[in-house]
Image: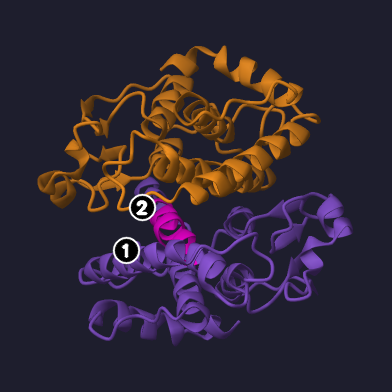
Chain colours: A orange, B purple
Amino acid sequence: MKLYTFPGAPNPRRVHIYLAEKGLEIPFERVDIMKRENRRPEFMAKVNPLGGLPVLELDDGTHLAESVAICRYLEALHPEPPLFGRSAREQGMIEMWLRRLELYGMVPVGMVWIHGSPLTKAVVKRQIPEVADQYRQAVAQHYAFLDRELATREFIAGASFSMADILALCTIDFAAQLNGLPIPPDHAHLGRWHRSVSARPSASA
Amino acid sequence: MKLYTFPGAPNPRRVHIYLAEKGLEIPFERVDIMKRENRRPEFMAKVNPLGGLPVLELDDGTHLAESVAICRYLEALHPEPPLFGRSAREQGMIEMWLRRLELYGMVPVGMVWIHGSPLTKAVVKRQIPEVADQYRQAVAQHYAFLDRELATREFIAGASFSMADILALCTIDFAAQLNGLPIPPDHAHLGRWHRSVSARPSASA
């Protein structure tokens, strides 16, 4: 196995944190997103036609793209400790939260990134500042929702750390560090959760 | 168990097709999206704080939202026939496709729906026609991508029908019927796949 990745970027970071939580190591090849190496024709022809990172190359030559798909594949091979849930109920709840975090968190943050960041201006067809404004509000709503939910439990999807916490951490750090969207100081529960998961050794993976 | 649903809407339809493929029946309660019953304060307080459908009420009172999470929960209880894959490789590939279909298919179709449909004009803060145009192009790229991929295999994620085919069918039918985005006639492989999955008895569930 080999992981095509760019450590530090938000989606690759999910897999690096997952590997650290599992105590797994996989050799990796660095593909520089800033130099758009992931958009080169040979990378898109051979590794991922959509050009995204990370991608896991399996021993049979299959290329498995999408961060959560890579982690779910590894979870099937290495079930302990479970990060996608054990019982049917846990599996369902974690999947619910993965989808809520992706669709109501990372997608809006991505819209702010695409339409509002000076760093993407050169590669986006045309930035529409009003779109960035609309999605800044969506991210604020998402943060408020997470804060209310975290009032009643320790981690995003329940009493145990899971893949959902990894997704939330990577999304929020990306939003805070590169999109000017930090956790508001009055969101005490979300702030408490963020300090807790950021203190885990995996967070610096 | 009880399913809160609105049969015919694209996300609830995923669960109804899944149930038909599995031969499962679950009592359901109809929540009228057109009358915005899913946005009423009591529904949001009791069933889903985000107001989305479908939602599965478990016997312990837990509310499980998000179509794919509901199906994944049911899959853990009823593994046969597998619609999320059996081997680690199958599970990973199906998850990869679920995410590609959601993020590069349903999200752009949703943007066209929100920013370009007369049916959503009254409930959206402000439609931006240029956004609808940008995402119509993204949907066209997604169709072309699926057409190239389906040149080499029978179903979206491999040789067997899976949850990925359910997602793709519901997204494309929604795009075609309500957003003016039919499969282009020159996309022979995607057209062949669409006729094949539409002919399954589950498609009318």
- For image coordinates 30% across by 77% down, the residue present is B190
Say above or below: B97 vs A99.
below
Q: Within 10 angstroms of label 1, few (less than 14), some, or many (20 or more) residues?
A: some
Residue that numbered label 2 is attached to: B93
In this rendered view, identify the residue nearer to me: A167 or B179. Answer: B179
- Chain ID at mark 2: B
Give the image quarter of residue A10. top left
Say above or below: A141 vs B172.
above
- Residue B89 among those drawn in magenta: no
The C terminus of chain A lies in quadrant: top left
Question: Element at badge 2?
Answer: helix
In this rendered view, identify the residue nearer to me: B184 or B180. Answer: B180
- For image coordinates 48% across by 21% down, the residue present is A21
> Real-space Cα distance between discs 1 and 2?
8 Å
Give the image quarter of residue A25. top left
Q: Does residue A95 appear anywhere in the picture? A: no
The outermost residue toward the right is B42
The magenta segment? B93-109
- For image coordinates 62% across by 43% down, the residue present is A137
Where residue B151 sits: x, y (%)?
21, 72
Residue that numbered label 1 is attached to: B158
Cβ atoms at labels 1 and 2 below 8 Å apart: yes
The N terminus of chain A lies in quadrant: top left
